[in-house]
Image (cartoon, rainbow, N blue to C red):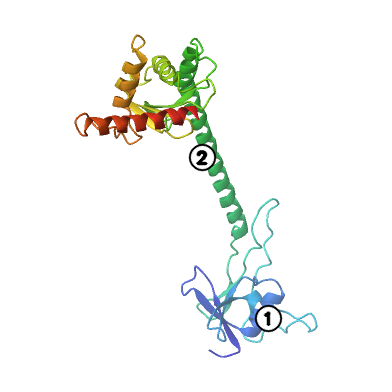
Amino acid sequence: MSDSRLILHIKGTENQTTELPKNVVRAGIAQGQISRSQLIWSVAHNAWKQVRELPQLLPSQKLAPAPAPRVGTVSLPKRAKIAQGQTGPVPKVVARASKGGTPVAVRPVIHAAPETDLLVGQERGFRFMKWICIILTVLILAAVGVNYLLVDQPLVSRMSQTTYANVPVYAHLGAFVQPDALIIHVPVSSAVTSANLVDFLQVLAHSTPKAPGGGNTFDDVSLTTGWAGHYSFTGYAWKEFGDMADANEEQKQAFLLDQLKDTSGQSLVSSEGALEPAAQQAERDKVWAEFVAYFTQ
């Protein structure tokens, strides 16, 4: 290709390109008939470049306007006016070659500005995230409300009618989505001591409400002084312990030790016969001392 001619990218035409004299292209740019975003093949860069990236084609304020083209004539329409309120860049007006070699005008096409598309996409994304946050908030509030009405409020109400009404206790379903798992929080209080711990736990078990799933008992009941369960009982064992109001303290303590498990469901004392009687008793005493210390210190 001669240095006096340029190749323009004309999307939608038969060959997607057209070749025009350089002085014709400069005249079209100077008169505003060729957009500065028009793609022109740059031999120096071996790539398509926009007019604004090729300063040698841009009109200079110090030079007189380019002379009229000698090779052929270019009939380009005046720049289209954008309707009031319409967004988008100035219509692109480019030239392509007709079958006879004479350049003719290509009808201008108005495209939405990329910046506008980006802003619209960001706004849609923001609205989507906003609705996601709203839905999650509603679900969390609903879970907290259900937990309070079905578990926490009944437990606190029943405990307030006992001699341990001044002991702070509250409960929630396991992870708020496991209706058959209950966690009871018993923050350390001066009202609970090593002397009355067994009696307090028996009253607490008797005050525990039924599982909201429809059964009489929970599958698992965990006790803790903090946020995570520390000791656990099966739901049946916890209910049976709550019904032991007439048993003496020694019987209640023995039952607790026999049923006491860690959070994984593993018994904390060895089964009967697994150890010598003396070793068995030493193990039970150690587990009980740790259990009492956890709730009274």
Q: Residue at x 26, y 31 (%)?
A: 278
According to the picture, the residue beneath numbered tag 2 turns out to be 132
Q: Position of residue 221 (x, y in %)?
A: 37, 26
Front residue of 276 and 56:
276
Residue, far front: 278
Q: Secondary structure at mark 1?
A: helix
Amino acid type of the residue tagged 1 in the rendering: Pro
Q: Residues within 10 Å of mark 1 (few under 14, many from 20)?
A: few
Of the two numbered discs 1 and 2 in the rendering, the one whose residue sits closer to the viewer: 2
Asked if residue 127 can be seen in this view, the reply is yes
Residue 97, above or below 133? below
Q: Which residue is mark 1?
A: 55
Residue 235 location (% of width, % of height): 32, 23
Q: Look at the picture and state if 238 lies above or below 18.
A: above
Image coordinates for residue 75, horizontal then vertical, percent: 64, 74
Q: Position of residue 184 (x, y in %)?
A: 44, 25
Labels 1 and 2: the sequence-earlier one? 1
125 displayed left or right of 280: right
Amino acid residing under circle 2: Ile
Judge by depth and name the residue closer to the eye, 80 or 257.
257
Q: Farthest residue in the left direction?
A: 273
